Amino acid sequence: MTKSLNNKQNKFFIVYDNNVNSLKIKKILEKKITFFSLSKSNIIIVIGGDGFMLHTLKKLYYMNKPFYGLNSGNYGFLMNKFSEKKFLRNIKSFNSIQINPLEMEVITKKNQKKRAIAINEVSILRQSRQAASIKIINGKKTIIKKLISDGVLLSTPAGSTAYNLSVHGPILKLNSKKLAITPISPFRPRRWRGKIISEKSKISIRNLNVVKRPISAVADNNEVRNARAINIRINKNIKFNLLYDKNNSLHKKIKIEQLRKEIFSD
C-alpha cells in the first residue's frame, strides 16, 4: 500500500547503532531534517542493518509508530538504501507494509516458561554434538513423529529469504498467509524437506530426549536454552509497520530473491 508523506506534518525520531556508516548518515540527516523526541514523533527512522532493525522493532513496537530503515550494514533486506541526494524526495512517498510476528512460548527442562517474538523465524537448534530428536505437531495433528536433524525452523514470509532460504526452504510471498517449516540438515527422515502451512497454525515442537539431546529455541536473535517444548503461533495483536521507498518495496526484494533462487537452481 502506498501512502503520501508530508514533511510539514511528520515528525521524526532517530535510532542508530554505533558503526561508522551509521554515524555518518546520522550527521547528514541532522542537516536536512529536524528530529523530535520519541513521544512527539510519528515516524521512527532506524539507521543500521537488519539485526539492529529487528532489535529496534521489538523494543519500540508498543509505540504503534511506523519504522523507516536506512541501511548502513550489509544486505539490509528490511532497510532502504540511503542516498544523500534522494533522501528528501524518497520520504515524501513510500510503501507501508504491516507484519505480524511469530510468538514462541518455551518450556525449559526446569519447567520454566519463557516468551519471545520473532519477525523472521523461530529456530530450534541442537545444543550439543548430538543431533536433535524432535516431534512436530500442528494443532492436534502430528506433522512428523520423529525428526533427527541439526534442527528445524518456522519462518514468516518476511523471513523466508533469510535463514530459511539458506537451508533450502521455500520463498513465501508477503501476502501468502503461509508459514514455512524447514528442517536443518535432516538425518532421519533424510528426504523430508519440510512443509508450508497456514499462518493460523499453532505449532508445537517437543524434544524427545531432553537429557541426551538438548535443544535451544531462538526467536530471531533471542535464545532460550534447554528447551523441553516450544509452542509457536502468529500474534495478530502485535503489528509492525515498515516503510519503504516507492521503488524499493519488500515485495520487490522477495521477487528478486525468488529469481536468484530459480537461476542458481537451474
Image (cartoon, grey):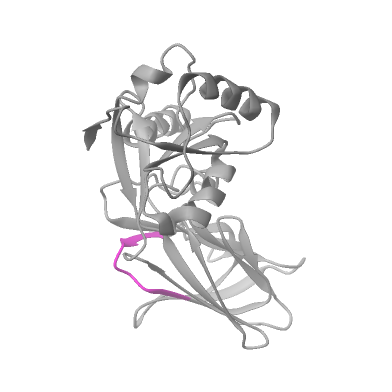
Q: Which image quadrant: the C terminus?
A: top left
Pick the front one: 29 or 137: 29
The image quadrant that residue 179 belongs to is bottom left
Residue 154 appears in view: yes
Q: Is residue 172 above or below residue 214?
A: above
Q: Which image quadrant: the N terminus?
A: top left
Pick the front one: 131 or 224: 224
Residue at image coords 53%, 49%: 56
Q: Position of residue 60 (x, y in %)?
A: 48, 54
Pick the front one: 161 or 149: 161
Residue at image coords 74%, 80%: 212
The image quadrant that residue 25 belongs to is top right
Magenta residues, start to end: 195-204
Residue 145 appears in view: no
Main secondary structure of the magenta stretch: strand
Residue 73 in the figure: left or right of residue 195: right
The furthest residue to the bottom = 111
Q: Is residue 247 above or below residue 133?
A: above
Q: Is residue 196 magenta?
A: yes
The furthest residue to the right = 129
Q: Is residue 173 above or below residue 247?
A: below
Q: Position of residue 209 (x, y in %)?
A: 65, 82
Residue 240 in the figure: left or right of residue 149: left
Q: Number of marks in the image? A: 0
Q: Position of residue 236 (x, y in %)?
A: 31, 64
Q: Is residue 44 magenta?
A: no
Q: Position of residue 233 (x, y in %)?
A: 39, 69
Q: Is residue 129 above or below residue 28?
A: below
